[in-house]
Image: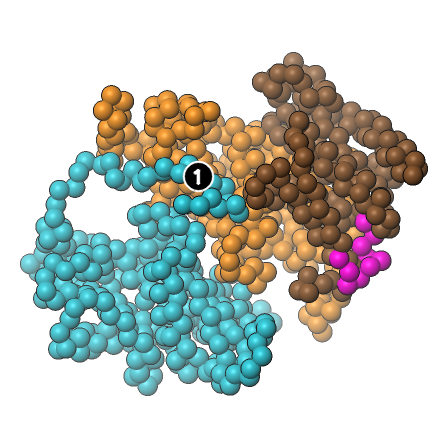
């Protein structure tokens, strides 16, 4: 790895200590069998179709136009939105405003240490977020301008992408950016016949591996009022009927989050009124 | 163009280490040098302009930061850009027997703390204070006095050098 | 009306406030903002803490890894503090490599850790020349509103105090390492340095614990770091000159504040353990 001249550099041969723990001889199949018991109850006591509890707060960042903090189980994410600004060095006129998304995992957010530079997964998530949010924002309201959306994952305990989209949606709404609808998002992990809503980190990683033929992860973002799906993201190998069933489950779960976001945004508006 | 300031001149400071690219430590020195020159130069006389100051480390034989600051002051004087005051840096060493020295002690292990001060030439107030190591307030006070006395010599030297030409 | 005046003539706006000995946020000139500490909220890190000083929020997560010590200090481990100022925390920062401000903050933090000797790096060494701990302390600013260093140091020290390292069995003959995650030890933090930030407005008025707006309008900002009753650093990186009298007044105040914040961190650690 080249030396980073803009940071304090660690020794080059640092390795995570987890590599030297007593060898984990369980195969991923065995690990997977422990995740769900006969009654469809997961390790943390949730039913397979149960979403984790969500805590949400807007206005956490003093100098941002809008910001939101979300806690979905142990997953903790902050999102901030800044005023639309002119795009520097742009010559052509653009009828629709731009949305810039920046998704970042904090170095300590995952079991394995993340690097400071944006890696390919973070870049992929940034572009997914951009596509999902673009559909929810009235981009024609600010032609030739750009809205910046930044997301930082403090603790990744699974379903980080969907939590990030929900948080970014709330941040955009609290920033007063014109939007068509509130955007919410949800994740589903599938392995064989097991369908897990809002998977945690372990469930998520195990569903990405092909233990059975049918496996994968689906993330959808929904604009609830018009029953529209603004973005669909899937990894893994799934047959058609499973995908369409999954969409129904995810759609329902996304709709359940909407009142929470609404309440949160209303609270921030009320707080704004009482201040002035 | 992005760095144009409408009310004063922009001071660009480049501190270059002896070899290789500047690292975090060099940026740290650069920030001190930049802030010092910004206050000393009468920047508000030259709005929308920029002053570039480049410092190249030649050889480090102790008291590097003091030397760099004094060099920057002399260079500013030589450039003829209006200044509000001159500035001079002094380094002081606190050894483990409680003595203060202006010269770098022979044995590195004896040093308990290092103080670097920069004074202005008018009121002799502190512009920069940079310290290494842990020390008592009294020691800090004594070091400050010692450096202030020492800075007189530096100011005298600078005046002599400038009037020579 | 007041808001547009604030935007158009910020310095005049502040001068009017300061003339009547009060700041726009309602504080007196010599008042600090409330401090909040939360410990151990990130389970993926080996130690973590969140510190809030007014509206400045900073989170520190520490991850431990194993490495070989440097040949010149064969009996020492590493503590690598890096301050991140992501674009998320303030409109001042743009995406990309660390800004100059972030680099200066990282170096200042590393200097303070070294100067205050708050942690003995030799205790991080597991076997001389062969194996040592490397603690990656990543300090990320979530909300930036001035006095960054105060928050960074509180977060770093609280996180260091909450670090739990597993026990490692090292066999030098076979160069084999076995980490026992069931048995964990905390670090021995000898002392807690506490930083206080001050700003000089109009070259004569000293403002304690400045906000972001105050820092940008002031002609100088400086930090005083106190460890127990000693000074660890008096860092004034240029800017308007200050008289001795005011400087020593600030040192006195920093000492008083340090003991209060030390107690706060202790309480937070204690409550986290019970």
Residue A143 is situated, as x and y percent measured from the top left of the image, at 53, 83
Q: Is residue C222 left or right of residue C135?
A: right
User: Quadrant of the rendered structure where residue C268 is?
Assistant: top left
Q: Is residue B49 magenta?
A: yes
Provide the chain ID for the residue under circle 1: A
* Residue A271 appears in the picture as rendered: no
Q: Quadrant of the N terminus of chain C?
A: bottom right
Residue in view at x 17 percent, y 38 percent = A23
Residue corresponding to mark 1: A10
Question: Label 1: how many residues lie within 10 Å, few (<14), some (14-19) or many (20+)?
Answer: some
Where residue C161 sits, quadrant-wise, is: top left
Residue A73 seen from this side: yes
Chain ID, orange in image: C
Residue drawn at (75%, 30%) of the image: B90
Residue situated in front as seen by the camera: C229 or C111? C111
The stretch drawn in magenta includes residue C274? no
- At mark 1, the secondary structure is loop
Q: Is residue B43 above or below residue A23?
A: below
The magenta segment is B41-50
Furthest residue in direction top, as rendered? B97
Q: Using the image, determine if residue C166 lies above or below residue A60.
A: above
Q: Residue at the location (33% across, 31% down)?
A: C185
- Image position, residue C124 (x, y; %): 39, 28
Q: Which image quadrant is residue B30 in? A: top right
Measuring from the top left, give residue A73's x and y in whole percent: 30, 58
Left or right: where B134 falls relative to B119:
left
Q: Colour of chain A?
A: cyan
Colour option used: by chain
Relative image position of residue A55 (x, y in whole percent): 36, 62
Q: Nearer the viewer, residue A200 or A60?
A: A200
- The residue at 63%/55% (across/down) is C212
Chain B drawing hue = brown
């Amino acid at each position: 790895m080249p030396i980073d001249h803009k940071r304090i550099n660690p020794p080059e041969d640092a390795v995570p200590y987890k590599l030297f723990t007593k060898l984990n001889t369980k195969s991923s199949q065995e690990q997977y069998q422990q995740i769900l018991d006969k009654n469809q109850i997961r390790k943390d006591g949730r039913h397979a179709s149960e979403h984790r509890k969500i805590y949400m707060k807007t206005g956490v960042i003093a100098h941002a136009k809008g910001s939101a903090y979300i806690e979905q189980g142990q997953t903790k994410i902050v999102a901030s939105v800044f005023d639309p600004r002119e795009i520097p060095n742009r010559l052509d006129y653009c009828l629709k405003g731009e949305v810039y998304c920046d998704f970042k995992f904090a170095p300590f957010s995952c079991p394995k240490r993340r690097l400071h530079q944006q890696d390919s997964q973070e870049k992929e998530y940034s572009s997914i977020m951009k596509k999902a949010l673009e559909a929810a924002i009235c981009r024609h309201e600010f032609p030739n301008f750009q809205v910046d959306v930044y997301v930082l994952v403090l603790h990744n305990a699974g379903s980080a992408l969907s939590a990030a989209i929900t948080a970014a949606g709330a941040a955009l709404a609290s920033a007063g950016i014109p939007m068509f609808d509130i955007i919410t998002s949800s994740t589903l992990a599938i392995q064989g016949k097991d369908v897990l809503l809002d998977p945690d980190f372990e469930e998520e990683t195990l569903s990405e591996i092909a233990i059975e033929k049918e496996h994968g992860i689906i993330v959808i973002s929904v604009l609830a009022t018009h029953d529209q799906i603004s973005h669909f993201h899937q990894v893994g190998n799934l047959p058609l009927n499973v995908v369409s069933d999954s969409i129904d489950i995810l759609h329902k779960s996304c709709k359940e989050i909407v009142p929470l976001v609404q309440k949160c945004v209303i609270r921030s508006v009320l707080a704004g009124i009482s201040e002035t | 163009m992005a760095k144009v300031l409408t009310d004063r001149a922009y001071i660009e400071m480049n501190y270059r280490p002896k070899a290789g690219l500047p690292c975090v430590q060099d940026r740290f020195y650069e920030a001190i040098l930049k802030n010092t020159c910004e206050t000393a130069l009468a920047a508000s006389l030259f709005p929308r302009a920029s002053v570039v100051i480049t410092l190249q480390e030649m050889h480090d034989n102790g008291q590097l930061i003091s030397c760099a600051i004094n060099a920057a002051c002399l260079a500013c004087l030589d450039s003829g850009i209006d200044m509000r005051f001159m500035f001079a840096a002094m380094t002081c060493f606190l050894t483990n027997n409680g003595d203060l020295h202006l010269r770098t002690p022979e044995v590195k292990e004896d040093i308990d703390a290092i103080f670097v001060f920069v004074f202005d030439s008018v009121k002799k107030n502190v512009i920069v204070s940079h310290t290494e190591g842990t020390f008592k307030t009294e020691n800090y006070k004594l070091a400050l006095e010692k450096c202030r006395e020492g800075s007189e010599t530096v100011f005298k030297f600078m005046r002599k050098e400038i009037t020579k030409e | 009306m007041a808001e547009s005046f604030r935007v158009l003539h910020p310095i005049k706006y502040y001068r009017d406030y300061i003339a009547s000995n009060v700041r726009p946020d309602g504080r007196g000139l010599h008042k600090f903002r409330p401090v909040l500490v939360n410990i151990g909220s990130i389970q993926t890190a080996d130690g973590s803490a969140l510190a809030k000083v007014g509206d400045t929020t900073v989170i520190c997560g520490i991850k431990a890894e194993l490495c070989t010590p440097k040949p010149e200090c064969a009996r020492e481990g590493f503590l690598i503090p890096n301050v991140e100022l992501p674009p998320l925390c303030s409109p001042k920062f743009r995406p990309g490599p660390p800004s100059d401000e972030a680099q200066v903050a990282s170096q200042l933090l590393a200097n303070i850790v070294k100067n205050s000797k708050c942690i003995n790096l030799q205790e991080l060494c597991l076997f001389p020349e062969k194996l040592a701990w490397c603690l990656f302390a990543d300090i990320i600013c979530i909300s930036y509103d001035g006095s960054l260093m105060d928050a960074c140091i509180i977060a770093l020290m609280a996180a260091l105090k909450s670090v739990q390292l597993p026990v490692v069995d090292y066999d030098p003959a076979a160069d084999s390492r076995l980490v026992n995650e069931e048995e964990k030890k905390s670090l021995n933090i000898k002392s807690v340095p506490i930083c206080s930030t001050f700003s000089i407005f109009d070259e004569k008025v000293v403002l304690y614990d400045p906000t972001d707006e105050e820092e940008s309008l002031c002609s100088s900002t400086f930090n005083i770091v106190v460890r127990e009753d000693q000074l660890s650093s008096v860092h004034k990186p240029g800017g308007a000159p200050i008289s001795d009298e005011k400087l020593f007044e600030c040192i006195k105040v920093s000492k008083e504040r340090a003991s209060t914040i030390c107690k706060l961190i202790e309480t937070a650690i204690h409550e986290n353990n019970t």
